[in-house]
């Protein structure tokens, strides 16, 4: 005859055996997935885009990450190069939870667009329902106000492929003129599509190709 203590011992043993069977085997050496990043800026990465206006005019441009530059306050700014027939440079930084845009340099005209205060370009990672505002000045002290919200995830098909991307809508008021900018950002890729609309202008930008340097 089984005593109560013996029965409990056998029951616990059976439960342990079932648990061991149900658990998947551990795979040694499986890499941990990186944390979400909707605006990755690794060195030597590049993205190629094509823009099309409502009038059918097409143009291409390439964005490339050049280097990280240490600032006097100990922070690091990431320098990017934009080639679109002409050349200009944009500097970003990525403190926790944010992507900040600091300045743009147009060497052919020796002009610098310095945002005051530093512009909150993007929250990172992006979460549905997130909102943020930025108000300040840009080129030649022109007043700018931006209000952004994350609408949610959408499937986007562009020449570079099909992506699950977070949709961000931004209302921009610059020197009294209102414009709407809608952008789609894919995790670990960056911007894959953008739509800019104003009363007199509309342009759609799509990702054509991109490349990140492979880690050794």
Image (tube, rainbow, N blue to C red):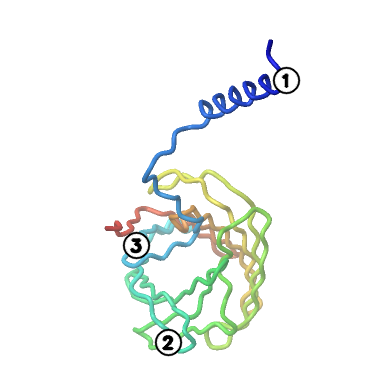
What element does badge 3 sit on? strand
Q: Is residue 129 above or below residue 164?
A: below
Instruction: Check disc 3 and report the residue beneath it.
Output: 46
Mark 3 or 2 closer to N-term?
3
Q: Is residue 23 left or right of residue 7?
A: left
Residue in the foreground of this view, choosing between 77 and 14: 14
Query: x and y percent of residue 2 in the render?
Result: 68, 14
Considering the image in quadrants, where does the C terminus appear?
Answer: bottom left
What's the CA distance linking mark 3 and mark 1? Answer: 69 Å
Measured Cα–Cα span from mark 2 to mark 1: 86 Å
Q: Which residue occupies the extreme left position in the image?
A: 216
Q: Which residue is mark 2?
A: 111
Q: Crowding near pointer 2: few (<14 within 10 Å), some, many (20+)?
A: few
Percent coordinates x, y for residue 109 in the rendering? 38, 86
Where is 23 relative to 125, above or below?
Answer: above
Q: Nearer the viewer, mark 3 or mark 1?
A: 1
Q: What's the residue at 41%, 65% (across, down)?
A: 41
Depth check: give the residue in front, 12 or 157. 12
SS class of the residue under badge 2? strand
Q: Which mark is residue 45?
A: none
Q: Nearer the viewer, mark 2 or mark 1?
A: 1
Binning the other alpha carbons within 10 Å of mark 1 as few (below 14), some (14 to 19) or many (20 upward) gives: few
Q: Earlier in the sequence, mark 2 or mark 1?
A: 1
**Residue shown at 56%/24% (left/top)?**
18
In primary-sequence order, the first of circles 3 and 1 is 1
Q: Kindly indicate the quadrant of the structure image that contains residue 15.
A: top right
Position above or below: 122 against 86: above
Residue that carries the numbered disc 1 in the rendered image: 4
Badge 3 vs badge 1, beta-carbon distance below 8 Å? no
């Amino acid at each position: 005859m089984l005593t109560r203590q013996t029965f409990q011992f056998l029951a616990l043993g059976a439960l342990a055996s079932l648990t061991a069977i149900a658990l998947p085997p551990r795979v040694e050496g499986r890499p941990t997935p990186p944390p979400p990043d909707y605006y990755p800026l690794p060195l030597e990465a590049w993205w190629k885009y094509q823009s099309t206006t409502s009038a059918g005019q097409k143009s291409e441009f390439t964005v490339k990450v050049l280097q990280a530059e240490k600032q006097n306050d100990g922070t690091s700014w990431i320098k990017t190069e934009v080639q679109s027939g002409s050349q200009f440079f944009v500097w970003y930084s990525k403190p926790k939870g944010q992507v900040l845009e600091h300045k743009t340099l147009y060497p052919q005209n020796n002009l610098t667009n310095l945002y005051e205060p530093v512009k909150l370009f993007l929250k990172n990672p992006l979460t549905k329902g997130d909102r943020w505002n930025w108000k300040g000045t840009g080129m030649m002290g022109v007043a700018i106000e931006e209000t952004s919200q994350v609408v949610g995830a959408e499937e986007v098909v562009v020449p570079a492929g099909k992506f699950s991307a977070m949709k961000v809508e931004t209302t921009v008021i610059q020197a009294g003129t209102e414009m709407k900018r809608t952008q789609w950002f894919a995790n670990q890729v960056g911007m894959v599509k953008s739509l800019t609309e104003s009363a007199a202008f509309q342009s759609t930008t799509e990702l054509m190709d991109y490349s990140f340097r492979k880690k050794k």
